[in-house]
Amino acid sequence: MQRYSAFSLLRHGINRHTTWAPAWRSPPLKDRYDVIVIGAGGHGLATAYYLAKEHGLTNVAVLERGWLGGGNIARNTITIRSNYMRDASIPFYVKSVALYEAMTRELNFNMMHSKRSMIDVIQNYPMMRDRRRRQHIMDIYGSTYEQISEAEVRRRIPALTGGGPDARLPVVGGYVHTDAAINRHDAVAWGYARAIDAMGGEIHQQTPVTQLLRGADGRIEGVETPRGVIRAPKVAVAVSGHTTTLTETVGLKLPLRTMNLTAFVSEPVKPLVDVIVNCPDAGFYLSQSDKGSLVIGGAPDPGQSFRRDIKQTVFEDTVSAMLSLFPSFKKLKFLRQWGGHLDIAHDASPIQDETDVPGLFITAGWWGGYKAIPAGGLTLAHLVATGRPHPLMEPFGINRFRHLDYVMETGTTTAR
Amino acid sequence: MAAGNRLAAGGRIDRSKPLHFTFNGKAYTGFQGDTLASALLANGVRLTARSFKYHRPRGIVGAGVEEPATLVELMGDDASGNRPATTVPLTEGLAAKAVNCWPSLAFDIGAVNQLASRFIPAGFYYKTFKWPNWHLYERPIRKAAGLAAAPSEPPSKGHYETRYGHCDVLIAGAGPAGLMAALTVARAGLRVMIADEGCEAGGSLLSRRLTIGGTDAMEWVDATFAELNAMPNVTHLQNATVWGYREHNYLMVTERAPANPSLLERTWRVRAGHVITATGAIERGLVFGNNDRPGVMLASAVQAYVNRYGVAPGKRAVIFTNNNSAYAVAADLAAAGVEVRAIADSRDAVPDEARAIVPGIEIMAGKCVTEAQGTRQIRSVAVAAKTGGSARILSCDLLAMSGGWNPTVHLWSQSRSTLRYDDPLATFLPDTPAQPISAAGAANGALTLQDALRSGAEAAAQIAGTTPPDIPDAPDLPYAMEPLWRVETAKGKAFLDLQNDVTVDDIHLALREGYSNVEHVKRYTTGGMGFDQGKTGNINIIGTVALAQGLAMDQVGTTTFRAPYTPVSFGAIGGLREETVALPYRHTPITEWNLAQGAFMYEAGARWRRPGYFPRAGEGLQEATNRECRAVRFGVGVYDGSPLGTFELKGRDVGRFLDYLYSNVMSSLKPGNGRYGLMLSDDGLIMDDGVCFRLDDHRWIVSTSTGHADAINGHMEEMLQTRFPEWNVFITTVTSQWNNATICGPKAREVMAALGTDIDLSPEAFPFMTVRDGTVAGLPARVVRVSFTGELSFEVNVAPRHMRALWAKVMEAGAPFGILPVGSEASHVLRVEKGFLSLGHEVDGTVDAYDLGMGWAMSKKKSDYLGKRAVQIRREGAAPRRELVGVIPEPDRQIPEGAPLTPGGRREKTEGFVTACVWSVVHERWVGLALLEGGHARHGETAHVRLKGGEVIPVRVTAPCHYDPDGDKLRS
Amino acid sequence: MMQIPCPFCGPRNESEFSFGGPVKPPRPDPSAVSDEDWTAWLTQVPNPLGPVQEQWWHVRGCGTWLTIWRDTRTHDIVEAPDGGR
């Protein structure tokens, strides 16, 4: 792998940058691999990376129907955090945050990991209670969550001038999650792709899987693509919203729904907000990218959707919620929007498991799984390579639905 | 004018109305009708901006929304971030400055980046700034990025507005095609909305010298609008951009200068039967060396400045084109007295009709500009054969370039309608519509005036079902072009995206490094991702990629067009929907009384504004709560229970309907009696708890928790309408039809007696969990004996119009007994002491009735009810259950709600958590509730709370009920 | 913002409705079905890349629960509650 550094930029600059090697190859497609990973999004690439790095499996093909890094990793709000509520989830996300922090070094690719902390702006007392519950259990797993006063919220977010004492939703305090970060999503995809390629794995773009293939013994046998049948004894599906579309080709039904989540950005402006701001009561969150755009997220659209667009109603709700806390943003301009189609499981927690089709693995239900990418890849690689779930993912097997043992991470904010 | 670039005559400016403005602190004068850009050009200001990455000097390039170079920041009252100078109408006193340069536009420190430019190619930041970590570099980089400063204040005056619009046909664009279309559908009687983004209608006609029907084209525009505006079925929105195209022909239009002076902007949400996109076309630039220098402009922009604004953007011009349209620009320049040195045309064969309109101007066929020379202002250009060879230097101060035309297909594409690549026009054109939409005029590839008029008329006639009207004669130069994606012999940096400083070399580097998909190229180089979203440059990026990869244009494809077409202020989107509008409070009739008492009020779920506690002078939350609790436990208190969800169910089948909804049996209730019950989802999770009272055989009252009332309403209607449509059940929400004062405490009966009632209050005649109708204090009332505090309680329900009177009488009659109003905080303490559960505290989506010690609520008799089977299956699993227990902290201290319980207080997986902990006025100590693994079998044991930071608090595990476990008090 | 054809009120803005989930097969008789079939019915919903039948509640209108067929790729309503369109 060609090293990237300030020095290498100088060296290649002398040669007018004609000497840079491709970050990844376009190898010929073979008809057989040890493992096929479907989807060159964040989770698929991370899985292939850890298959090679941790388990020495390099006869691996990542098949991507579009362009690598073009899935939800290309359309999310780049928030990395671990402020969850249950024993099942927190250690997994703590691991994921740690892997993200080490990623720039590990992949020799600048992820622009900006550990800038997230502030939950709390605007009613039931929500305060929900957050208070999190801080103690998060501490057990080494994740940080501190209550701060309203004055401190405003000191750390000077642009937050709304939500005063007479407001409909007054700011009553906040919580700071110092582990939270944003980074550069494209860099994550490209960094993994380069590392996979360097270790011998293959990434095949423009290679949509149209059908999963099952052998006479019921095991997975491979996949069908417009470029021909590709065989492998193990196939891992990491395609987010399209999981059920694929698994239905082998008659497998899963407790997943596909939905669309709204995000949009403002025009680029000079530094304005230094932390990630999450306003669960108002219903939006935002951070400012290093390029200066505010990246803003809101609620999902009602109903299932495979559209990569946004619903005007949801969008307007999000914008007016934001303006109630940040009235000066009225003059700021909306520049671009997108939607990502995400899958959500029946209990709103992820599913990572081998399915009823032996050799067929899924990682799904991440519901915006950007923050889970490295740990999700680590655990899926472990499962694919060893046949046993990684300890961090044990609670998230598919069998929990047979016993109705849901992992309920959704908050509990009923009023007193 | 100082620099004398204003032409002596002509243009649509009003020379009788001079306007004063400042740019970067320097004072200038323009005229009414100018944009900031035209006024700057008229004043001879050429250097107007610095570029994003290299801080290269830039000038004005375009004349409209496509402007890629000159973004300004407006100051003063109108302060707002990035605005293309070409879209800022000049006003008296306007103050603007260039964005992203320091200390000044002329001397910009950031320009040192130009020296290092060789070492900071596309994507360089992915390769460096890694040691020791990104944070070392992030702050200065963030400062350097970001263009304009963010607005720091909301608008000082005025407001925004949103309204709905409905029409048969929405026409985007009031150029020749849009106007012809509007005329056609309006005459057919259809309801028409026509929206145009310009300050003035007319589109391209404003900038060109054309005739329609033998008269000046702008006269035709005026006549057309005169006819349109006289029709009641026409709505005309000028200075209004159609920026978003959603599903079901729902479009967003923002008017920037609505007639109402108190309005800043108005957004229309338009539901259109049909849409015609007559959005015109945007000229693309040409890609040669230093094509970003001030003085290099789009030919169409030069034409606009000359004809519309009466400004000559230079004294000596060279034209560089690959198509016919720039010949008309040359002709207009010459007519305005500007010297046109030459026309460099990359085509070997220049059509005769183009040659014919530029007599006397040198035409250099098959030639390209390879380089613009000069730094802050071009001084000359080098022109050479397409294939290379020696260059001829032409001195000039203006280069008007035209790379051909891109139909403005943004809205078309946003509607999910498809595009196709058209070879003759070398651009993407509308193909298959996905919604009721048509494209007309230049937006559909009709690039001459006559074609545009015809195309607008035909699209409209098809919608209206009429025959197209006759098209007036409108002579125009035929359009022909040959694509030129970049000049291969270019010398120096050749920019594809001026705003983000993306050059041809950057694209080639991306491709070399494997970023081969156009999406990768865009993301790696940031090409097309600026404020202008690549309106002039994207197609050249695609062309450059296609050339490098040997692919056809449509194989490379275009990137996705998404809303907004041009940036829109968030204020215009959020409209008037401030939080109080979006989330109105729900009040009960005694809110004012509560406020007058000095109650601490807050939202308590489902938007109800309720009193938390009633502090007296010097009291905090705890003291006030204790006082209110003592009143209820030892005397009497009263609370307003009106927000509880209340439903009246009528019909023959209500009993079995409730048996299906509740886990316990309701159908066996006798009239006048009630029962507490749990509603489960079919997943076996507790949705709600509440009480049902049977009023008579076919009338029932169901009450639910406050927070879940709306959800339960939907749930009941869903079950009834979708599962049992044949059942005879009618559900009416009566939450707001009944208000209540709930009088509770050992002295409650005495207060009731003092109020005066015709209901026999004795425990025998009116036992616990029964309901009686009668009068209380002379008011018709329904009294329910239900208790959420564990004390003797009378819930006195009256019509809302009587609530205030009732409340006053209760306070009056209760005064001798020391009655106190009770807020939510005290209610919480009282229910915790009693071990009553609260959704959101004890019920957090994981527990079932058995865990809560309420197995009795799970009917064994009923063969089916919602959640029954799920609970069975879940309990057959091996997973340990967390069960409701009481906890007594030892030592006596408060435990924060939600604090985890871990084995021995060690730092390991939790075995439960404390759901609530309150100061008990009965025990005069802290008591709590918890969910604890295997808790039912652990009464008497010690469990351990582990707080953040490692502090461990032992707690004694008890039964959940800390007070009156046999319920003698509430039955008394 | 979709426009949903309410059979009583005519075409109305989506904001008047509350989404009620995709239509599942009829609820099996819980006493006559295996655990596996029951949990499958409970936890799985149709998730097609294409038309899905779903319920909407006209909560800020006439109160009707109605079903439409909507294409999940486009939001096009391919069949109205009364079978029209």
Image (cartoon, rainbow, N blue to C red):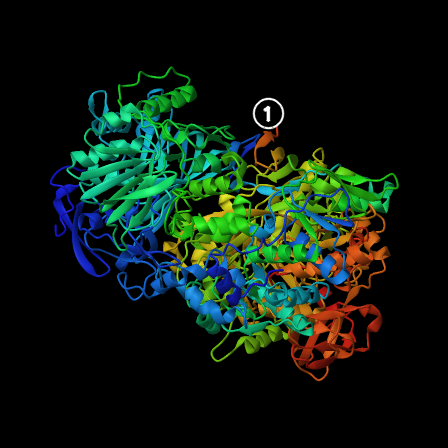
Q: Which residue is mark 1?
A: C84
Up the image or down, A348 lies above or below B335; here it is below
Residue B411 lies, with reference to residue B61, above or below; the image says above
**What SS does tag 1 mark?**
loop
| Residue B397 screen position, x and y as percent | 22, 47
Which subunit holds the residue at mark 1? C
Q: How many marks?
A: 1
Q: Residue at x 65, y 58 (%)?
A: A195
Residue B447 x, y percent position in the rendering: 35, 28
Along the viewing direction, whichever of B693 and B406 lies nearer the viewer: B406
Q: Is residue B792 visible?
A: no
> Residue at the bottom extreme?
B891
Residue that lies at the very extreme toward the right in this rendered image? A217
Q: Is residue C21 visible?
A: yes
Say whether residue B243 is left or right of residue B63: right
Question: What is the x, y in percent for residue B261?
Answer: 26, 47
Along the line of sight, the residue nearer the viewer: B510 or B244: B510
Left/right placement of residue B488 relative to residue A18 reads: left
Between A110 and B304, the one lying in front of the other is A110
- The answer to whether A263 is drawn above or below residue B957 in the figure is above
The vertical placement of B703 against B489, above or below, is: below
Q: Label 1 is placed on what type of residue?
A: Gly
**Furthest residue in direction front, as rendered:** B390
- Quadrant position of residue A99: bottom right
Locate residue A137, reporting x and y percent: 68, 71
Q: Residue at x 79, y 47 (%)?
A: C39
* Label 1 Cα neighbours within 10 Å, binned few <14 / some 14-19 / many ≥20: few
Residue at (25, 40) in percent of width and height: B318
